[in-house]
Amino acid sequence: MSIFGNKDEKENKSEERFNFLLDQQHEINQSTLAKDIQIHGSIEAKDYINFDGSINGTIKAKTVNLGTASYMKGTVSADHVTIEGEVDGDIQGKDVYIESSAKIKGTIRYSNIDIQDGSIINADLTYY
Amino acid sequence: MSEAENETQEIVNHDLNSNDSKTIVIGSGVRMEGKIDGAMNSDISGTFNGKIKSDSINISPSGVLVGDIIGSEVNVSGKVEGTISSDEQLNISSSADVKGTIEYTSLKASYGAKIQGKVSHKGIVHSIKSVEDELPNMIDENKI
């Protein structure tokens, strides 16, 4: 995610657009939002979102990966959710994977869950 | 002897042979009610209704526990309804069905495990960043 490291903002944006166009050519759309992105609002995608920024809002997709640098306050809902960062809010997914670096506060609704050693969870869990 | 009794006998023999006296085994098919305290190892394959305080606690796939579990190393493969408190390692396997309150220090839950209820981490809770503190500033900066 350090590809944005030494570039100015304009370059960052154009590169992001370029990556997005590249991704569109594949059958599965994959969007990556890097560390330095902050969002107030919602993100929605049909396929895959790889999010490493900060968001106050909602993320919805088929597969969502919240990376180690990610911070989210709000709701994430997807078929497959992987949490490596911090979440303060609601997580909903058929498959929820909580990695060792995850810090979670809120609620988790799931059909299948996998929790790794080291994760810090203070949440209400329900399965459906 | 029934199969369940044989199994219990085997476990008891095994533990006696290993010279571990502070062990309690509730074999599958056995129902028990009450309070267990001071045990090093507790192995529940039957049904236990009550409170267990033990260093190491193992609820096997056939085990059912209704009540409270307090231990350091806790392995759950069966059914638990109540509270689980673990000071070291809590393992919840894919066959487990846990309803209630969990307080843990280190938790590993395998894919497929059913956990319903309140899960909380013991000890110092590393403060989760407050987005209210961070995000408004970032947004203001963007406006400028």
Image: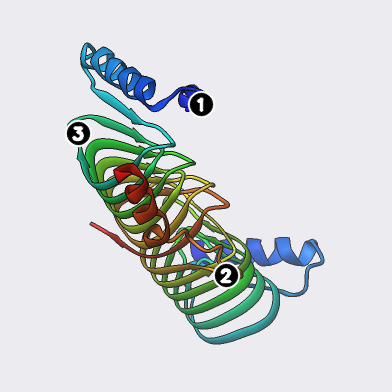
Image-based side of A61 in relation to B19, left or right: left
Q: Chain of mark 1?
A: A
Q: Residue under circle 2?
A: B122
Q: Residue under circle 3?
A: A45
How far across and how far down the image is residue A43, in percent?
A: 22, 40
Q: Specify whether disc 1 shares its chain with disc 2.
A: no
Other residues around mark 3 within 10 Å, as few (<14) / some (14–19) / many (≥20): some
Label 1: state its secondary structure.
loop
Q: Residue at x 48, y 58 (%)?
A: B77
Between the residue at mark 2 and the residue at mark 3, the CA separation in whole angstroms equals: 36 Å
Q: Within the image, what quadrant is residue B53 found in?
A: bottom right
User: Along the line of sight, which residue is nearer the eye, B36 or A95?
Assistant: A95
Using the image, tell me which numbered label, if any, was put on residue A5.
1
Q: Chain of mark 3?
A: A
Check the image and report above or below for B61 versus A124: above
Between the residue at mark 1 and the residue at mark 3, the CA separation in whole angstroms equals: 26 Å
Q: Residue at x 58, y 79 (%)?
A: B52
- Whether residue B2 is visible, yes or no, is no
Q: Residue at x 23, y 22 (%)?
A: A29
Q: Which of marks 3 and 1 precedes in the sequence?
A: 1
Q: Specify whether disc 2 shares its chain with disc 3.
A: no
